[in-house]
Amino acid sequence: MATMAGRSGSSISRDGEKSSEEEEEEEEEQSSKPWFVVPLLVCAVLAVSSAGAVTKLMVGAAPVANAGWRLQVTSLILLPGFIWQWLSLPIPDRQKVLLSVNLTIIGFSGIALALHFGLWVWSLEHTSLSHSLLFVSTPPIIVAAVACGIGQPLSKEEMLGVVVGMGGVVIVAAGSCTEHDSEVTLLGDLASFAAAAAFVVYISAGRHLRVWMPLYVYAFPVTAVAALLLSLAGQVLGGSSGQISAPFGWLRTDYLLPVLFLAVGPGFVGHTGLNAVLKYSSSLIVAMAVTLEPPIGTVIGWILHVTPLPGIWTCIGGFVLLLGTMWLNYVSEQQQKVSKENLPLDDGGVHRPLHSDCSV
């Protein structure tokens, strides 16, 4: 996150301008940024962008079970980090984690994460890859739209982002009727949009826990709960005729490598990499980079021959939708800076932007 300008009374001169010492300190911080930050950000974005295309390669896997397989392996990858951080926690913090209210929040967050992955993987079977990636990338728009719907005042800048983003959604949805894309269905688009809404619930449920709870102590149980729920749901719901829905179906030779890639690539390198980059870069930079996931993911899908290139209206609508999302991310970052400057120094409850909580 960006350095808080008002962290010290001596950092601002009496006429309201930063002192030369503060400016030199900020320049030194920028110049000391590790060399691996940019390559790591590029690798992380490429990793998360590949998830949809690789998932579509897993032909014959029941969608809900497929989502559970990925989270099973992701849980195994997160387990060593959980054990290490748990053993490092002071006893009072361990007891705090085990409070019923916190365990309830972890469970609720796991349910929301299961819905997010289950709905999104299901949408990949019922709409085009480009549509699925575009609609699942709308959490900032959903957050702002919900705030507006419940009467929370929005700034003109936020309203502009919502209008532009929803305009893009309308263009994408309406354009699919004229493009006659056989892959696109309204139900598939709605499932992807619902997956984005579930992600908002997931982030909201765990937001105040992540202020004080170590990453793996939070991420492992949430991911494990989601994996368990999806595996059970896969057994109950099954799949279409001939689809594999066994809880450990990923151990089959034709699914093992794709599932391992999804867990290690998008699951670990992607999201954990984004969290690592946030330590050295502004959350706005990370958010803007992640916004490139739909076009990059679509190109990867085209290269892997799992989807055709999108039509002109999908491209136009997608550009408008992502423009609205990027604008809302920018506005969110500016509001965060203002909030930080106006908060006392010992306030540990600063709400982070939606895009800064990448944990699975």
Image (tube, grey):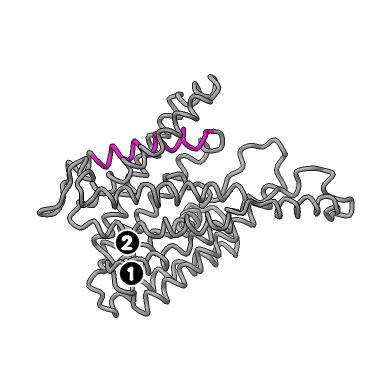
Assess disc 1: are there few (<14), some (14-19) or many (≥20) residues with their C-alpha within 10 Å of its C-alpha. Answer: few
Q: In the structure shown, which secondary structural element does the residue marked by tag 1 occupy?
A: helix
Q: Is residue 149 visible?
A: no
Give the image quarter of residue 107. Answer: top left
Q: How far from the left and from the top, in percent, is residue 305?
A: 27, 69
- Mark 1 touching mark 2, by CB under 8 A? yes
- Residue 224 drawn above or below residue 277: above
Q: Is residue 56 visible?
A: yes
Quadrant location, the C terminus: top left
Would residue 224 be counted in the magenta stretch? yes
Assess disc 2: are there few (<14), some (14-19) or many (≥20) residues with their C-alpha within 10 Å of its C-alpha. Answer: many
Which residue appears farthest toward the top when viewing the image? 91
Q: Which mark is residue 357?
A: none
Residue on which disc 2 sits: 53
Would residue 176 be counted in the magenta stretch? no
**Separation (CA) of disc 1 from disc 2:** 9 Å
Q: How far from the left and from the top, in percent, is residue 125?
A: 24, 60
Which residue appears farthest toward the right when viewing the image? 14
Disc 1 marks a residue whose amino acid type is Ile
Q: Which residues are magenta?
A: 213-231
Residue on which disc 1 sits: 303
Q: Which comes sooner in the sequence, label 1 or label 2?
A: 2
At horizontal 51% and vertical 35% (from top left) the residue drawn is: 209
Disc 2 marks a residue whose amino acid type is Ala
User: In this rendering, would 193 be left or right of 149?
Assistant: left
Question: Which residue occupies the foreground of this view, 76 or 230?
Answer: 76
Task: Identify the main secondary structure in magenta.
Answer: helix
